[in-house]
């Protein structure tokens, strides 16, 4: 149990569907992150939130829309995805922004997304 | 732009052997270097974090070192066990870019 819970664990969707990924952390952390992990590629940072405010959007296409209603919850809304978006999407949290501290990130187990 | 490389991509060793995993980075202005473990179908578990002012960190059978001048970090695993089988990733936080850059990882298999 890492303290970061992601749902669903697996998701298959068509290119025209709309779905959402959910992340919840029970660690009292202030910063939350979305990463994309594709086969044979390094983790790619997508979005960063600190105290519910987005601090970084790493040139992510608009078909990915993040939402952070509070410091414990993070969503990733998906619409009109492409086959190349199939990947493992990982959520992470840290006490403070990693760029401002030496606190480690805690990861959830991810959502395996497949686009048909 | 920071780039992180891990070699080899895969490693297979017999149980009980000591081993070293390598990580190299291009930007020596690194703020910290973190090692993670990832089991199949799971997220990342933080193992060790070395700050730029430190040269190494130890946790149980694991020892991680950091040499900023050469742009290298190593993860030493002593007396390997089958339960150590996983993918090990390193990630560097670059002071100049304020973001974490990950390597692709080394997939380790410890054979009983």
Image (cartoon, coloured by chain):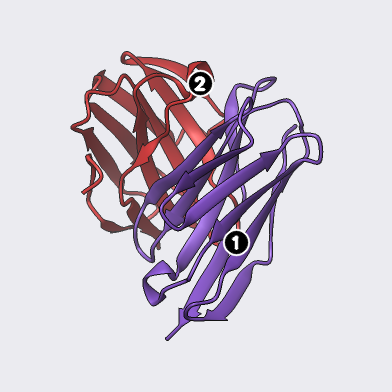
Chain colours: A red, B purple
Residue in the picture at 52% in, 58% down: B88
Q: Give percent across and percent down for residue B90.
A: 57, 47
Residue in the picture at 40% in, 63% down: A116
Residue in the picture at 22% in, 23% down: A28
Residue B24 seen in the current view: yes
Q: Measure how far apart labels 1 and 2 are at the Cα level.
A: 24 Å
Q: Give percent across and percent down for residue A93.
A: 34, 31
Q: What element carries label 1?
A: loop
Question: Disc 1, disc 2: CB below 8 Å?
Answer: no
In the picture, residue B28 is in which quadrant?
A: top right
Count of numbered badges drawn on the protein: 2
Asked if residue A102 is positioned above or below residue B78 in the image, the reply reads above
Q: Give percent across and percent down for residue B62.
A: 48, 54
Q: Residues within 10 Å of mark 1 (few under 14, many from 20)?
A: few
* Residue placed under numbered mark 1 in the picture: A40
| Label 1 or label 2, whichever comes before in sequence order | 1
* Residue placed under numbered mark 2 in the picture: A56
């Amino acid at each position: 149990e890492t303290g970061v819970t992601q749902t669903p664990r697996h998701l298959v969707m068509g290119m025209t569907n709309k779905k959402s990924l959910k992340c919840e952390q029970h660690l009292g952390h202030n910063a939350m992150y979305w990463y994309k992990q594709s086969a044979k590629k390094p983790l790619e940072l997508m979005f960063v939130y600190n105290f519910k405010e987005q601090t970084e959007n790493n040139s992510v296409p608009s078909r990915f829309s993040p939402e952070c209603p509070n410091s414990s919850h993070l969503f990733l809304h998906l619409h009109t995805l492409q086959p190349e978006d199939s990947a493992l999407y990982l959520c992470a949290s840290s006490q403070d922004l990693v760029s401002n501290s030496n606190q480690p990130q805690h990861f959830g187990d991810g959502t395996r997304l497949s686009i048909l | 732009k920071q780039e992180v490389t891990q070699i080899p991509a895969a490693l297979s060793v017999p149980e009980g052997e000591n081993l070293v995993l390598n990580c190299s980075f291009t930007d020596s202005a690194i703020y910290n270097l973190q090692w993670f473990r990832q089991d199949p179908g799971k997220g990342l578990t933080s193992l060790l974090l070395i700050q730029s002012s430190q040269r190494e960190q130890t946790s149980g059978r694991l020892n991680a070192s950091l040499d900023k001048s050469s742009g290298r970090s190593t993860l030493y695993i002593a007396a390997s066990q089958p339960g150590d089988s996983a993918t090990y990733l390193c990630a560097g936080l670059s002071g100049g870019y304020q973001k974490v850059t990950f390597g692709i990882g080394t997939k380790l298999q410890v054979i009983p």
